[in-house]
């Protein structure tokens, strides 16, 4: 038997009802804030991720699904392609390619779709997983650098989680500085690490040289006392970054969005500047980050585009759904159909189908049986589908243009004229 590949999975009904409901709540909330959807390709040139996410990150150095796409004709070139491990790079590439900044407007874009990372699969961690994300990006003249944008992005997230019914989330917030103050901090960090890195885990020893910020992200218990004594980024922010971060916090406080400062929060992608954040949830076990994001003021320029500061986030949809389980998920499952139509006897499928079409056109959900089913089998089929009402379509009913409606719960039966049926089932 051929099974789904490790780290991938099928999402089946009724779970897909919950996924769809979550996505539609997100679409409704995005619309309230004037975000519009963008759909970028699932694969891109490998270079895009290497240059944006960063060569030294775990994602680029070991987790990408990359292949050499050979030329199929003389006119084509072979190229290295990669399944997208995240979507911000693709959105910023599209922003540059289609000159979305030229209107002078702020762009507020969202996406929903699969991402791919070759990580070790475990609970809440997959090789194909889904993200619901958004980006606010534009020329500085459109206000894209303003702390008001950071606060708005965090506030839309609080609204999303609350509306979906996810309770007990925590927002961790940090500022990781900018091109101006980061070098000073990195120098201080490198110096401090030089004296202690030998005592740290192999990953940290490597990161101390390649990407020292990532040391702060280490989860190995023995390393924690060492990390606690390293210089703190909050002490190295320049005046502008400090003010920017303070303003983000005041707006959040004014809006009543609770947050916890965590100056070790650095996130795994190189492009972040200033505001960086993560929302966690208690239901998720070890992989407790439900979403993450931050500001990326230099990303467009790093990809050869115009100056276009931005901020965005990506919600892990798989984890979002896990966090919902046991809270609101049941109510998101689609209801059973309103009525089961049971055609009784030869020639009755025609009449059943016509009646089903009429009722469905009136917004009533209908399941349709088959004329070969005996009445008992129709009742059992309806029960299996969780439907309590069965409409019997037999020769007598067709002649009278009125149908017997059996209530399987109470056992009662009434006769209803065709024209009265839509009103009878109206929600
Ligand atoms: P990132 O793009 O790394 O900032 O991740 C944003 C969010 O995507 C995380 O907070 C997770 O909820 C989710 N996520 C990242 N990687 C995976 C994965 N391998 N499986 C499931 N969810 C993931």
Image (cartoon, helix red, strand yellow):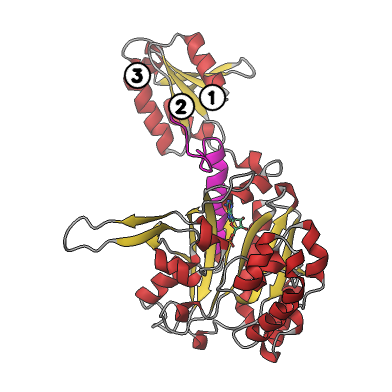
Q: Are marks 3 and 1 in contact (CB under 8 Å)?
A: no
CA distance separating discs 2 and 1: 9 Å
Q: Would you name the residue on which mark 2 appears?
A: 367
Residue 301, compared with residue 23, is above or below; it is below
Residues in magenta, as a range: 1-30
Left or right? Give the position of 258 relative to 364.
Answer: right
Indicate the position of residue 179 as horizontal and vertical percent values.
59, 85
Indicate the position of residue 89 as horizontal and vertical percent values.
47, 68
Indicate the position of residue 273 as horizontal and vertical percent values.
60, 78
- Which residue corresponds to the image point at 53% horizontal and 50% vertical from the top-left? 129
Specify few, some or many for label 3: CA neighbours under 10 Å numbering under 14, 14-19, or 20 or more. Answer: many
Question: Looking at the image, is mark 2 or mark 1 nearer the viewer?
Answer: 1
CA distance separating discs 3 and 1: 20 Å
Q: Which corner quadrant holds the N terminus?
A: top left
CA distance separating discs 3 and 2: 13 Å
Q: Which mark is residue 349?
A: 3
- Which residue corresponds to the image point at 46% horizontal and 39% vertical from the top-left? 363
Left or right? Give the position of 143 relative to 3.
Answer: right
- Which residue corresponds to the image point at 48% horizontal and 80% vertical from the top-left? 138
Assess whether residue 275 is covered by the magenta stretch. no
Q: Which corner quadrant holds the C terminus?
A: top right
Left or right? Give the position of 54 relative to 231.
Answer: left
Left or right? Give the position of 417 relative to 248.
Answer: left
Q: Secondary structure at mark 3?
A: helix
Q: Which mark is residue 385?
A: 1
Q: Are marks 2 and 1 in contact (CB under 8 Å)?
A: yes
Q: Given the current orientation, which residue lies at the most extreme bottom position?
A: 239
């Amino acid at each position: 038997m051929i099974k789904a590949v490790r780290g991938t999975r099928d999402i089946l009904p009724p779970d897909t009802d919950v996924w769809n409901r979550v996505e539609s709540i997100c679409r409704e909330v995005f619309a309230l804030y004037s975000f519009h959807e963008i759909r970028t390709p699932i694969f891109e040139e490998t270079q895009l991720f290497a240059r944006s996410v960063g060569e030294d990150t775990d994602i680029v150095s070991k987790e990408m699904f990359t292949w050499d796409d050979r030329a199929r004709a003389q006119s084509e070139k072979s190229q290295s392609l990669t399944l997208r491990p995240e979507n911000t790079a693709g959105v910023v590439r599209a922003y540059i390619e289609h000159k979305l900044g030229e209107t002078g407007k702020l762009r507020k874009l969202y996406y929903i779709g699969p991402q791919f990372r070759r990580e070790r699969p475990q609970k809440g961690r997959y090789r194909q997983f889904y993200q619901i994300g958004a980006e606010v990006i534009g020329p500085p003249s459109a206000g894209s650098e303003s702390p008001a944008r950071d606060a708005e992005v965090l506030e839309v997230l609080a609204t999303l989680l609350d509306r979906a019914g996810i309770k007990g989330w925590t927002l961790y917030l940090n500022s990781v500085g900018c091109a101006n103050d980061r070098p000073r901090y990195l120098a201080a960090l490198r110096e401090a690490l030089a004296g202690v890195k030998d005592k740290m885990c192999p990953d940290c020893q490597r990161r101390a040289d390649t990407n020292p910020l990532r040391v702060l992200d280490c989860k190995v218990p023995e390393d924690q006392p060492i990390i606690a004594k390293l210089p703190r980024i909050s002490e190295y922010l320049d005046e502008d970054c400090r003010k920017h971060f303070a303003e983000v916090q005041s707006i959040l406080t004014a809006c009543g969005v609770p947050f916890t400062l965590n100056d070790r929060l650095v996130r795994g992608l190189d492009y972040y500047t200033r505001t960086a954040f993560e929302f966690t949830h208690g239901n998720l076990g070890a992989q407790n980050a439900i979403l993450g994001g931050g500001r990326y003021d230099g990303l467009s320029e790093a990809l050869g585009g115009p100056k276009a500061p931005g901020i965005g986030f990506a919600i892990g949809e798989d984890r979002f759904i896990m966090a919902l389980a046991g809270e609101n998920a049941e109510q998101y499952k689609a209801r059973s159909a309103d009525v089961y139509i049971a055609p009784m006897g030869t020639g009755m499928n025609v009449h059943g189908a016509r009646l089903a079409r009429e009722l469905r056109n009136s917004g009533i959900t209908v399941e349709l049986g088959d004329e070969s089913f005996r009445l008992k089998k129709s009742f059992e089929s309806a029960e299996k589908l969780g439907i309590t009402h069965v409409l019997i379509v037999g020769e007598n009913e067709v002649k009278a243009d009125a149908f017997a409606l059996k209530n399987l719960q109470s056992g009662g039966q009434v006769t209803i004229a065709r024209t009265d049926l839509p009103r009878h089932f109206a929600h």
